[in-house]
Image (cartoon, rainbow, N blue to C red):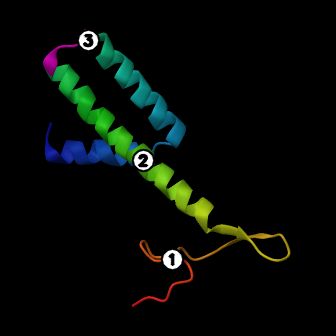
Amino acid sequence: MSKAAKAADAAKAEHLPFEEALKKLEAIVATMEAGDLPLETMLARFEEGTQLARACQGKLADAELKIQQLEQNAAGVAELQPAAVAGLAADAEPY
């Protein structure tokens, strides 16, 4: 597979909804665990699964960040707060 085709496949994986990407990943894992695929096909499925796993991890990280940023203000209304810089406490002064 050419680098352009790999990049296109990775871009497709990024644009899939999380649930769809996860279902595809689970199907690939089940197919690979069955062990009935030729080596070349197995490698292609592994590569596709890796791209889907990265896409899912990215979507989960984004969701986690959004959840961490949502806080309730004094009136009980959820509002988006700026994210803290990694490695710094929320109330710590930057260098």
Observer-side mark, 2 or 1, equals 1
Give the SS element for disc 2.
helix
How packed mark 2 is, by other alpha carbons closer than 10 Å (few <14, some 14-19, many 20 or more), is few
Majority secondary structure in the magenta region: loop
Observer-side mark, 3 or 1, equals 1
Task: Decide: is 10 above or below 43.
Answer: below
Mark 3–mark 1 distance (CA, rounded to whole Å): 48 Å
Give the SS element for disc 3.
loop
Task: Decide: is 93 above or below 82.
Answer: below
| Residue displayed at 50% across by 34% down | 20
In the rendered structure, the answer to whether residue 81 lies left or right of residue 47 reads right
Regarding residue 15, the answer to whether it shows in the image is yes
Which residues are drawn in magenta? 35-39
Regarding residue 12, the answer to whether it shows in the image is no
Q: Nearer the viewer, residue 79 or 94?
A: 94
Q: Amino acid at mark 1?
A: Ala
How packed mark 3 is, by other alpha carbons closer than 10 Å (few <14, some 14-19, many 20 or more), is few
Which residue is under mark 2? Answer: 57
Q: Nearer the viewer, residue 87 or 6?
A: 87
Determine the image quadrant of residue 2: top left
Assess whether residue 38 is covered by the magenta stretch.
Answer: yes
Which residue is under mark 3? Answer: 35
Pinpoint residue 43: horizontal percent, then vertical percent: 19, 27
Assess whether residue 37 is covered by the magenta stretch.
Answer: yes
